[in-house]
Amino acid sequence: MNIKVIINPNLEEDIVLECREMTPQIEKMINTLDTLSINAVHRGKDITLGLDEVCFFETEDDAVYVHTAKDSFRTHYRLYELEASLPTSFMRASKSSIVNLNQIDSLERNITSSRSVQFYNSHKITYVSRMYFQQIKQRLKEESI
């Protein structure tokens, strides 16, 4: 298989794959590329966000929101769908949220026994349930080694 990359700053950020036939290797490549971004809606416009920008996903009033450091966007996915398709750098934090481990600045356990996550370059905080706190703490420890 030959791979050819042509960079053209005048084009949208689309990727076109041309192949003679669909092979398992090409399907795997497509799945990998698909998991690097997520579709969302912001002020009525469809947008695509890179997963590296995402701090966390959260449900609110029967809708799922994608939170970045500065903004939030609505997505049509359900948390269980996201949990099944996101890369391993994402982890469930509670019944209503999934966090990006790569974006976590600090993990706190407060006197009132509440647990929260703060993110790099953001004022945003999300809460972690007791059930997931130790798992997240362990994963962060493993990734920092």
Image: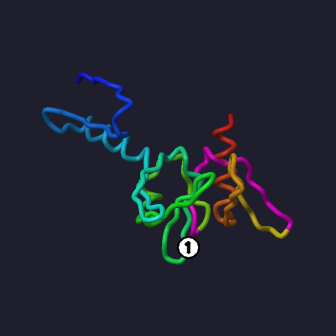
Q: Is residue 109 visible?
A: yes
Q: Quadrant of the C terminus?
A: top right
Relative to residue 100, is residue 2 depicted above or below?
Answer: above
Residue most extreme to the left:
20
Q: Residue furthest bottom?
A: 61
How many numbered badges does the structure rendering display? 1
The N terminus lies in which quarter of the figure? top left
Q: Residue at x 65, y 53 (%)?
A: 136
Q: Residues within 10 Å of mark 1 (few under 14, many from 20)?
A: few
Which residue does the numbered mark 1 point to in the structure image? 60
Label 1: state its secondary structure.
strand
Q: Quadrant of residue 18?
A: top left
Which residue occupies 69% across, 46% down? 120
Q: Which residue is situated farthest in the front direction here?
A: 10
Dividing the picture into quadrants, the one containing residue 7 is top left
Q: Would you say residue 145 sits in the magenta stretch? A: no
Q: Is residue 24 above or below residue 100?
A: above
Q: Is residue 98 magenta?
A: yes
Image check: 139 left or right of 35?
right
Q: Which residues are magenta?
A: 95-111
Q: Residue furthest right?
A: 111
Residue nearest the viewer, comparing 130 with 123: 123
Residue in the picture at 61% in, 61% down: 93
Q: What colour scheme does the image use?
A: rainbow
Which amino acid type is marked by label 1?
Answer: Glu
Q: What residue lies at 24% left-to-right and 22% top-to-bottom? A: 2
Q: Position of residue 26 (x, y in %)?
A: 26, 36
Give the image location of residue 17, x and y in percent. 24, 35
Foreground residue, 74 or 132?
74
Q: 123 or 34, which lies in front?
A: 123
Residue 5 is situated, as x and y percent measured from the top left of the image, at 32, 25
Image location of residue 122, percent across then percent down: 69, 51
